Amino acid sequence: MSVTAAKGFTAAGIAAGIKENGNPDLALVVNTGPRRAAAGVFTSNRVKAAPVQWSEQVMKSGQVSAVVLNSGGANACTGPKGFQDAHATAEKVAEVLGRGAIEVAVCSTGLIGLLLPMDKLLPGIETAAGSLSEHGGEKAAIAIKTTDTVHKTSVVTKDGWTVGGMAKGAGMLAPGLATMLVVLTTDADLENDVLDKALRAATRTTFDRVDSDGCMSTNDTVLLLASGSAEVTPEYEEFAEAVRQVCDDLGQQLIRDAEGASKDIKVEVINAATEDDAVEVGRSIARNNLLKCAIHGEDPNWGRVLSAIGTTSAAFEPDRLNVAINGVWVCKNGGVGEDRDKVDMRYREVHIVADLAAGSETATIWTNDLTADYVHENSAYSS
Amino acid sequence: MSVTAAKGFTAAGIAAGIKENGNPDLALVVNTGPRRAAAGVFTSNRVKAAPVQWSEQVMKSGQVSAVVLNSGGANACTGPKGFQDAHATAEKVAEVLGRGAIEVAVCSTGLIGLLLPMDKLLPGIETAAGSLSEHGGEKAAIAIKTTDTVHKTSVVTKDGWTVGGMAKGAGMLAPGLATMLVVLTTDADLENDVLDKALRAATRTTFDRVDSDGCMSTNDTVLLLASGSAEVTPEYEEFAEAVRQVCDDLGQQLIRDAEGASKDIKVEVINAATEDDAVEVGRSIARNNLLKCAIHGEDPNWGRVLSAIGTTSAAFEPDRLNVAINGVWVCKNGGVGEDRDKVDMRYREVHIVADLAAGSETATIWTNDLTADYVHENSAYSS
């Protein structure tokens, strides 16, 4: 059901010819109201793609009528012409919908450094507008895929209101050209500031902790639109939890579809002095290429976990560190613990627990193993 | 000639049986000179192996008579017993040489989390001491290899004095278990403080800027010993430059032998506001898995360079960035530059220049491509 699970939204997904292989590559999501509230979170990469620069301006306008998304080209590092193209894309959507361009967010994903084929994209917008439907959510989710093997959608329905959404890619810190684009919709009747608070709270502990390969995209965008169609204003906590659940579910789907991965690795840091310490240690472990190779080889190499922890500034004493892999405490007090042969690594999910013995805070980072397939996909992509 | 190129040093390398395959695994370097001055630089990983903890104490004693090095086991994350073993190793060397244990530095490399086979190591020290020779430098260099395919030595001879050395591994930020161990010797007559200053200056711009896979070892050690045998005290600048040359040469050898690599990548950051900015940007580029995969695929993917620059806090404006790959300015002013098809990627060395257009400082970081062979070597190693 994707972005059209919530009332007050239509969507479409079509093949505009941006991708040379003829696959769907253009999606449109329209808020049919009565409210056009929205919030957005964008990549923290300082090299921002043109559509991100445009959409950041749109967010400042206070309302969002529509989102247009294309795969087949990131429109990043494309200079003033790239920004003109993002603007022209929004203008075209505004024209066919009879809205203002400054209410149209634009998202793009694909190769960096290439201009979009506007001669295909602009007519495609007319086609997409002609096929907008209250059942178009799946098609929209399909049209934003790049190296994704499956499309990703999620829905949470509560008492009279719904949060739904679609995603593509594999993490805020994206592998390949697999920029993460997410559009969430709700028919709850909420103001921008509530949406913003709930979205930031949700992304902080979900998408921001999905770290497939440590690389940050120029195009990452997460949008939350509210139509007010349900004529219900939920309590903040309940709404925020629903948004968090949808983000968490979509984040898990991104990890499971990460390029070339054979293992999904849950890095749980416990007993940290602060949450920031827990996140720093979790990321350091999740980004350690040697460990990611070891996990690929089903080798419970806890020495590489300790080595990764040792590069952080978190509070800990080396001789008090404990590490469990799939439930076996292979490292105790900084040294050899239980027999590593007890660790069963046959399954796709691997669970690493790093106990800093320095406090009571915790954080979980999800990542993948490093595989020859990952190298292949990312060495061959643009050639 | 290695560590015995300089007068006043003997060395040996033997097979003590620490490695199960019977390869050489124990090296001894002894300072026979009138002076026993020394300086050391150690890993900044907070999880330090027992031999690092021991050798840091040795450095505080003010003089170093000998260095004992073993491959076949890192003696890291081995708790109090590991430290006792490092101490016992130094005691044994002291006993056979008639020196004090606190003058004996210890270096280990190999798997983390395993105790050393002291029943083989201690008798091995007697054997090594029996074969000490003024021509033993090559054998010592061979005995410290782990996954190294070649042993690494370098010598610079000046007017009446020499700096020589040996190295194993592939970077201060080491791939595999390829901890970097380096022992440098000189027959120049110099005090500890001069050695320390020269060694820190040299490692800062050489070994510290060799970043094969971003992973930092628990065991990295670089030692510089001075025998005074040449009875010459060179000018500081001349001596420091000789040390830098030997470190630079050994660093290049480490990169060329990095595990599984098919490309050596020189990342040169120019026109940075500060040297720190240049180093931060260089490291971010050098550690970007997506770019390392692209280089492996001979794909001059400058978008991934810009994306990596964008994650740093360095001073720059995105629309003023320029990137050259092998001499072709494929990115100009943050957008498309010269035709990327002009870039010749056939050779092993790849030269990336990132122009921040923000000042006049520069730094060069060396790294390698990311390959399926790297994944294989590091997923299969300890299994």
Image: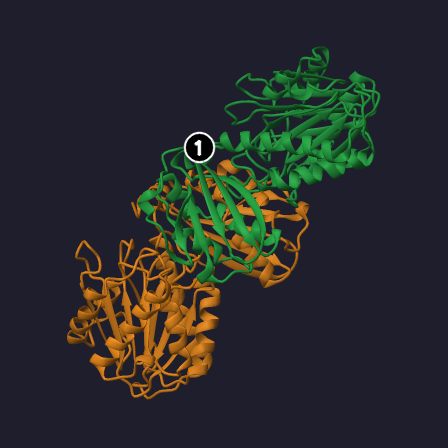
Chain colours: A orange, B green
User: Is residue A335 among the parts visible in the rendering?
Assistant: no
Who's the residue at 24% across and 68% down the image? A27
Residue B349 % position (x, y): 44, 35
- Front residue of A188 and A120: A120
Q: Quadrant of residue A220?
A: bottom left
Who's the residue at 67% across and 37% down the image? B202
Give the side of residue B362 with respect to residue A14, left or right: right
Who's the residue at 46% across and 41% down the image? B351
Residue A38 % position (x, y): 38, 79
- Front residue of A216 and B185: B185
Quadrant position of the C terminus of chain A in the picture: top left
**Mark 1 = which residue?**
B260
Q: Quadrant of residue A233?
A: bottom left
Q: Is residue A350 above or below residue A158?
A: above
Q: Quadrant of residue B92?
A: top right
Residue A60 % position (x, y): 42, 80
Q: Secondary structure at mark 1?
A: loop
Q: Is residue A205 above or below residue A316?
A: below
Who's the residue at 39% across and 82% down the image? A61
Tell me the subunit letter for badge 1. Answer: B
Residue A375 % position (x, y): 37, 42
Type of amino acid at the residue the image marks with label 1: Gly
